[in-house]
Every structure is written in structure tokens, then in C-alpha cells.
Amino acid sequence: MKFYDLLKEAFKSIISNKLRSGLTILGIVIGITAIIAMLSIGEGAKRQLAQSVENLGSNQLNVLPGFIQPGRGIVSAGRGTAQSLKMRDVDVIKKIEGVKAVSPEVSRRFQIVSSSGKNTNVLVIGVTPEYLLVRNSKVEKGYFFKENDLNRFAVLGPTVAEDLFGEEDPIGKTIRINKINFKVIGVLEAKGSVGFVNADEVVLVPLLVMQKILTGSEYLSLIAVQAESSELVDKVKDDITNALLKEHKVSSENQDFSVIAAQQFLNTFNSLINTMTIFLASIAAISLLVGGIGIMNMMLTSVTERIKEIGLRKAIGAKKKEILAQFLIESIVLTLIGGIIGIFLGSLLSIAVSKFANITSDVSLFSIILSITFSSLVGIIFGYLPAKRAAELNPIDALRYE
Amino acid sequence: MIKLENITKIYKSGEVETLALSGINLEIKEGEFVAIMGPSGSGKSTLMHIIGCLDKATSGRYFLAGQDISSFSDDQLADIRKNKIGFIFQAFNLLPRVRVIEQVELPLVYAGIKLEERREKAINALKISAFPDNFWYHYPNQLSGGMQQRVAIARSLVNDPLIILADEPTGNLDTKTGEIVLDTFQRLNFNFRKTIVLVTHEEYVGKHAERIVLMRDGQIIDDFKVKNRLIINHDHSD
């Protein structure tokens, strides 16, 4: 018996019982839809993360106060509260071979009021001119501060500029940060989300001004370092760690700072997202299992209903394997139809989720191949027992069955 | 053509053994029209199943067209059924939701024959069984019992078998339509020299064959040529 004829038989039988086939297929559709949606959202989250790390620059490192180990959380003093980094550390890091640029940063949230009375609460960061280089940022309008600038100047992120001034040109206008007047001298180019901070929603002020007037402390929130190349990141990371341990006169057990490569963040969060995705997809797979049991149930009923037909097919020369193939193909066709509809619905669902919930999703070829494989496997596994039962029927008993 | 030597069939059901056939010796020549007769429980159906390769004998030897098939595997027997035997059943055994023409093609599907050739052979078989051509694309439930049985006859003919085995083919039909079916058999036998083995418990039906094998309690008790044979349409025999 040719494959084409087997396929024709399978479709004929599925169509002859539309409602039953439809309901059985629905079980598979739900399972595959859920799997595709879960995998796509997971895949999208990973891509989004990779994108923001890419924006951050793959050869970037952050030195943070307090000791954090990626994947294990904060071990010693909390990151926000620890105060261990000073300008002296910046000088130490600048001397390390392979370091291209260093950007010391002090950040804190403040209430900001524009001259027209609009106000907003944003992150104010005290920076040096090297911020632009390290953070991969550009000034779109106006200009940036100079080294050791002591003027009360501010450069606005594009979102802040729009929030405070709308269509007006903010250059030359005055804003009040924490009730202190600052003159707007520039606006940054729009960049979108970088890491976990939206780089468009910040106000930059000169580092020294920030330390002296706004925070009143000499401690830094962060030192961003750019290595000369991404290959040098690991070496630079080790060198910074050693140099700062020496500078702070502490042993590695009492380390009071952390050096984290952007790439490392990516890895940590990727593994977290992977775990979540696998977990969610496994739950979805359980519904596929239930769908598979539905297939088996339907096929068993179908075999019982068609015992006489099976007897006749055997009488006119059908071999065991041909009967087996007929029923197995029927169940695979059922699950494959379910799988294809599921892929379609799952993709729609993930597109809808990314539209309305603002989560990136990415229907990958991998998840489609996985779903097709999975659904045909379900067809084979749950179709085998009924098909085997049909194939093993004794032709005489089958012909006489009433 | 068919030669059975000392065929025995024992059914086992738990501890109980039932002797269905005991020491059957039978020879059927090519072109013969034989009726196997006997009361129910005489073993005539079991004998037909063994002749039709649907069942295997417990002991004894079975030669079909010179080939000893007593020790054939299930798959080999399936091949014999496919290529050398045509079955006709009391209950017609047509597949529901399959058109007449495709019904007849079914054995050729298992023989792996291409669609165009299948169609050609099916049409030929339908013509031989005198099935009217305006019903070729109907479904079985749209046909009368006599028509359905003629579809089954066409199906049994389509692979050009050595033997046609008919198990109570008129059992579900009234006398008139039964005669049409018996006429078809006689025509196949006279005009196409087909070997036909017919199982029946009705003497009237058996008398349409040229030879009767009479069974009782799993044994052949008589084997004779039919005197005063009933011929439905005398045009054929000329």
C-alpha cells in the first residue's frame, strides 16, 4: 500500500467524523499554542536583554560598591547603601592597561521643576565628559560639560526634555533640581533602554557639582569602565579587582566592591529566563500530554468501531504493518493538524502579548520545529497502542464482530 | 488447484478443546463450481477459512496451485489472499462512506497498483458482475442488498483471483435477488472459467453448483456431482 493511499485513508476517516476529530485535535492545539507562546515570550525576553547589553557595549564593566556575585545576589553590604568607591579609585583604574575610558557616576532621584512649572521625578547622574564615551551616548543639541566643570549645568535626556519643555527648545532654560537652579546646556540623543535604566529618562550634571551641591558626599554610586576590546574584558576585570583590593587594603574575603562585566549580566539573566521558559513550557507540555490521551481515547474508539472493516481489509490482503500504518498515520495526521493550528495560534498569541503587554516575543524556528516534532511524537506514542490493537486482530474474529 | 491432505483444526478455549475439522481430504480442480454444505456447526465455515488462508490448520497439508502453504507466515498468507483469493460474505462487508468504484479498487490499493490502472480494472470487474454503470459513484447505503452483493462480487474479481470463496452469499437476500447473485456465479464459472467455492446450508442454493461436498461434525460425509443442476440462464452454458 502506497503512502499516498494511507494518507488519503487517514484524511477520509478524520473528515468522516468531524466533531470527534475536531475536539480531539483541540486538545493538541491548546498544548502546542501554550508551548509556542511560552517559548516565544522567553525567546523575546532573551533578545531584548541581549539588545540592551549590546547598547551598553559588550566591552563594558561596572564597578559597584558592595559585594555582589551574579547569580547569588548580594552577599555583603547592600549595593545602594554601601559607600566604598571614591575618586581615588577612578585614578587607580585609569592606570590599568587595557582600560580605554572610565566614567565615575553618582546618581540619585530628585524632583525637577522647569521654569514653566512642570515637574517630574527623575534620576540625576553626576558625570564627567567620559560618560558619553563609556555609555555610548551622544549630544543631540547644545553641548556637554568640560572636565572638572563646576558650573550648575544640566544635560537632559530626550524624554525628560519633552516632559519638561514639550516642543520648546530647552537650551538656555533653567530647571530646578532639588530647589537649586541649573542651566540646561544640552539634550542627549534618544537611545532607549540601556541595561535596567532608561537612558532617555535621566538628567546629567557635572560630577563635582553633584557631589558638592546635590548629595554632599564624595562617594560614587558606580564606576563604568570601558575596555579597549571585548577580549580584554576578563583581564581588565581581574586587574581592576586586584588593584582596588590593594587600594582599599582589604583581602578578597572582605571585598567591598564588585566588578561586573555587562556580558556577565547577560549570562545570569539568560539562565534565569531559560529556567522560567523551561518551567512554563513544561506546564504547557502537560496539557499536550492530556491532548495525547485524548488522541489515544479517540483512536481506541475508532478501532473498535471499525473492527469489521479491519477484518475485511485483512481478508483482501492487508498485512499487519499496513493496518498498523493506517491507524498510526491517522493519529499522526490528527496531532500534526493540531500542531500546525497550535503554531499558528501560539504565534498570534505571542504577537498579541507583545502588542498589548509591551513584552518582546520572538517565534523562533526552533520552537516551530520543536512543536512539530513534539506533536508528531504525541501522535506516534498515543496512536501506537490503538494501531497495534487493530493490526493484531484475528481476521476471522474481526469479520464476525457485531 | 486446491488439495487438502488430512486437515485437522482444533480450537482451544482454556482447557476445553473443540475439534472443528478432523482429517479432511479434498481436491478442487481449476474451473470447478463447488458448494460446501452442511448444518451449522458442521465445520464448513472453518474449512472455508482454511481454504481462504484466513486461518491455519492445526495439522495436515494444504497445497494451493502446487504450493505447500501449510507453514506460511501471516504476511505470506496475506499475500496469497491479496493475489489469489477473492472473498464474498453473507453481510457483503462493504466499507461505509466509500464509493462503489473505490470499494472495488480496494484490493488493488493493497497490491500497490497505480490509480489509472486501478480504475480500469475496477470498471472491468463491475462490468463482469453486471453492476449498472449509473451507480458506480454511489455509496453502499444507497444500494439494495442485491446491488451491494454485486459490488462485493466485483471486488472479489478485481485482482483476477484463482478462487472465489463465497460464504452464504445469498443468506441476506430474498430469493429473486439471490438468484441474480447465483446467476452471476454461474456466468463467471461458465464464461470466465473461474473456480468458485460456495458455502451454504440451503440445498436450493447448493444445487446451482456442479458438485456438492457435504459435511457433518467436522468431516466430509459425502461428495457428489449435482444431478438436475439448477441453471438460471441457459444462454451461458452454450
Image: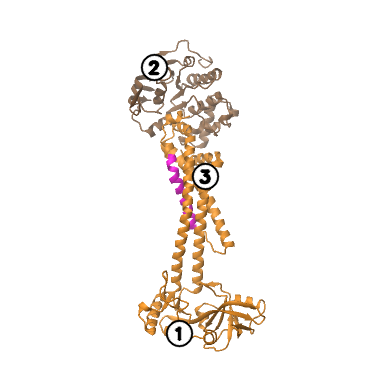
Chain colours: A orange, B brown
Mark 3 belongs to which amino acid?
Thr
Look at the image and say whether residue A12 sits in the magenta stretch: no
Q: Residue A375 location, x and y as percent?
A: 47, 49
Q: CA distance from mark 2 to mark 1?
A: 113 Å
Q: Residues within 10 Å of mark 2 (few under 14, many from 20)?
A: some
B228, B9: nearer the viewer:
B9
Q: Residue under label 3, please give it.
A: A24
- The numbered mark, 1 or 3, whose residue comes first in the sequence reads 3
Q: Amino acid at mark 2?
A: Arg
Mark 2 and mark 3 on one chain: no
**Span of residues in magenta:** A365-387
Q: Kindly identify which numbered label has been placed on residue B216.
A: 2
- Label 2: element kind: strand
Image quadrant containing the N terminus of chain B: top left
Contact between marks 2 and 1 (CB within 8 A): the answer is no
Tell me which chain the residue with mark 2 is part of: B
Judging from the image, mark 3 belongs to the subunit labelled: A
Is residue A369 located in the magenta-colored stretch of the structure? yes
Marking on residue A86: 1
**Front-most of residues A317 and A350:** A350
Residue nearer the viewer, A244 or B223: A244
